[in-house]
Image (cartoon, rainbow, N blue to C red):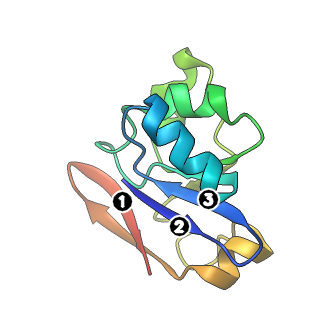
Amino acid sequence: MTIVRLPSGGVACFSPVALTDEVRNTVKEMGTMKYLVAPDYEHHISMTPWHKEYPQAKVIGVEGLDEKKTKEDIKFDVIFTKENRHTLKVDEEFDKEFDVEYVPGHGSSSYHSS
């Protein structure tokens, strides 16, 4: 898991792990959770408790995860696909801080940000 504090005080979480009290406290100290990112088919396992804890956060994933996670009541706000990989934007803040590259792989789809 990677957590990034944004200049605005918001927080982005990539590949969330188990949401323990220690992790929850660390996030609270860092700022307001704004983005929950599941970058591939493997790194979404703990997304449900994070989504429940931070319902205001924008949920970002790759194609196929929206269908896979709907039974857990996760609504993805942004889905990266092969078709939209060159044009998709998340929002002004996220797009300013992260460059995203869609890379099909890791068993299905994934993207990398820097």
The numbered disc on residue 85 is none
Residue type indicated by callout 3: Met
- Say if mark 3 contacts mark 2, CB within 8 Å: no
The outermost residue toward the top is 71
First in residue order: circle 3 vs circle 2: 2
- Residue 50 percent across, percent down from the top left: 55, 34
Pick the front one: 21 or 14? 21
Identify the element where label 3 is drawn.
helix
- The residue nearer to you, when weighing 74 against 105, is 74
Name the mark nearer the viewer: 3 or 1.
3
Identify the residue at image location x=75%, y=74%: 93
Say above or below: 32 vs 73.
below
Quote the CA–CA distance across marks 2 and 1: 19 Å
- Residue 52: % across, % down: 64, 25
Which mark, by number, is residue 30?
3
Pinpoint residue 79: horizontal percent, then vertical percent. 58, 52
Indicate the amino acid at tag 1: Ser
Q: Residues within 10 Å of mark 2 (few under 14, many from 20)?
A: some
User: Quick one: label 3 or label 1, which is nearer the N terminus?
Assistant: 3
Q: Point out which mark residue 110 bears.
A: 1
Q: Are marks 2 and 1 in contact (CB under 8 Å)?
A: no
> Can you identify the residue that label 2 sits on?
4
Q: Earlier in the sequence, mark 2 or mark 1?
A: 2
Residue at image location 67% in from the left, 78% down from the top: 95
Viewer-side residue, 27 vs 55: 27
Quarter that holds the C terminus? bottom left
Q: Observer-nearest residue: 6 or 59?
A: 6
Q: Secondary structure at mark 1?
A: strand
Q: How many angstroms separate mark 3 from mark 2 (CA)?
A: 9 Å
